[in-house]
Image (tube, rainbow, N blue to C red):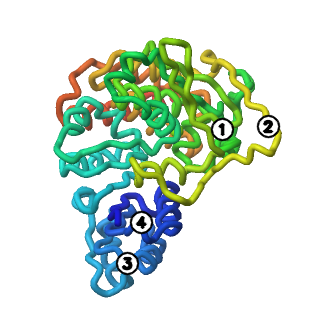
Amino acid sequence: MTKVSLLGSTGSIGSQTLDVVRAEPERFEIVGLAAWSSVELLVEQAKEFRPDAVAIGRIDLVAELEKQVPPGTKVLAGEKAFEELSTVGDVVVNGVVGFAGLGVTLSALSAGKRLALANKESLIAAGPLVRPLRSVDGAELIPVDSEHCAIHQCLRGSSSNETYRHLAKLVLTASGGPFRGLKADELSAVTVDEALAHPTWSMGPKITVDSSTLMNKGLEVIEAHELFGVAYEDIEVVVHPESIVHSMATFTDGTTIAQLSEPDMRLPIAYALAFPERISTPFGAIDWGQTRALHFESPDRSTFRCLNLAYRAGEIGGTAPAWMNGANEAAVDFFLQGSISWSEISYSIEDALEKHDAQAADSVEAVIRADRRGRECVASYLSTRST
Ligand code: MG
């Protein structure tokens, strides 16, 4: 029985993780559930899965939660509670959205747990802090992001030394998002609803906007660099609108190995929970009796400018990815609130990145400061622009 502690249980990754647990209850057991503010859904989940403990991020909601959870369930509250629940069970699923997931990543690895990481931002912003924690006894980082799960599978066949000696490049696929094929002048007036209409994946609003700008792919390039230790020049992005090939590894003899399935996040979640085993319930299996065509094309980097910004931040290293990630989170929030246009997302991040003063990302404080400065730069870009 694998004991699972699930942080961010009421979001998109959280509910799909519970689907996987539901599919194989003899294999997985939920021991902890944590959500930021959705009390009602958290209570429902607690009643179904009967974890030892539940946590709510917003302290003002703790009384409401306590009244409703099944008797005997421990109730925790606040950000520290998330970190506490990150040290229990065999596998910790980090499904927290955005930079707020950093504490969960650091706590789970420090406690020597397997971390099923859906929160890419913590790895991107704090790569230099996460790296050494991966060698803590028992600690293991398995990506839940579909592209990185694919690469993890492509590199499985051989020992890591052998794989890396013969690896030529990683190829990350991108669906291209809802605006693929459009040019900058056609994108100046797009609405929030249009940006949220992703053609192949059903995800939360932040990542869906990131997909529409290709920032999601840019963040994933940094994530791949951190996870697999591959140089930026050896990480390629290719647009593949069908989202069937989830990513690839190309070797020095010209071989490319790819992982294929229908887009279904339950597959990478189950992979991270069960590795090195595989579960018996298929999620996203392809019906090869259906005729289908797969297309690949180079990304339009002059329209989808965020991709280059992410490569630039990654190459600078240190706190630059944290700074850029903070700027992006702020810009996406402003866009979702209707305060900036879709096109301004990339310009405000570029402006923020130009103001970055390179620092070593050698402490949580340095990373938090960079994240905050990135956000402030976007806010000040917005205020100068509107006067
Ligand atoms: Mg992804």
**Residue mark closest to the camera, 2 vs 4:** 4
User: Residue at 78% of width from left, 32% of height from top?
Assistant: 293
Mark 1 → mark 2, Cα distance in angstroms: 10 Å
Mark 4 → mark 1, Cα distance in angstroms: 28 Å
Picture coordinates of residue 168 (x, y %)? Answer: 46, 15
User: Residue at 43% of width from left, 80% of height from top?
Assistant: 47
Asked if marks 1 and 2 touch (Cβ < 8 Å), the reply is yes
Using the rendered view, name the quadrant where residue 164 is placed. top left
Mark 2 → mark 4, Cα distance in angstroms: 34 Å
Question: Is 56 located above or below residue 120 in the figure?
Answer: below
Mark 4 → mark 3, Cα distance in angstroms: 15 Å
Between residue 218 and residue 168, name the one nearer to us: 168
Q: Which numbered disc flags the more N-terminal residue, 2 or 4?
A: 4
Residue that badge 4 annotates: 27
Q: Which mark is residue 50?
A: 3
Between residue 74 and residue 382, name the one nearer to us: 74
Question: Is 274 located above or below residue 128 in the figure?
Answer: below
Q: Amino acid at mark 3?
A: Arg
Q: Which numbered disc flags the more N-terminal residue, 2 or 3?
A: 3
Q: Amino acid at mark 1?
A: Ile
Q: Which mark is residue 292?
A: 2
Q: Which numbered disc flags the more N-terminal residue, 4 or 1?
A: 4
User: Residue at 24% of width from left, 29% of height from top?
Assistant: 128
Picture coordinates of residue 160 (x, y %)? Answer: 34, 27
Viewed as shown, does residue 18 lie left or right of 284? left
Residue that badge 1 annotates: 244
**Mark 2 crowdedness (10 Å alpha carbons): few <14, some 14-19, many ≥20:** few
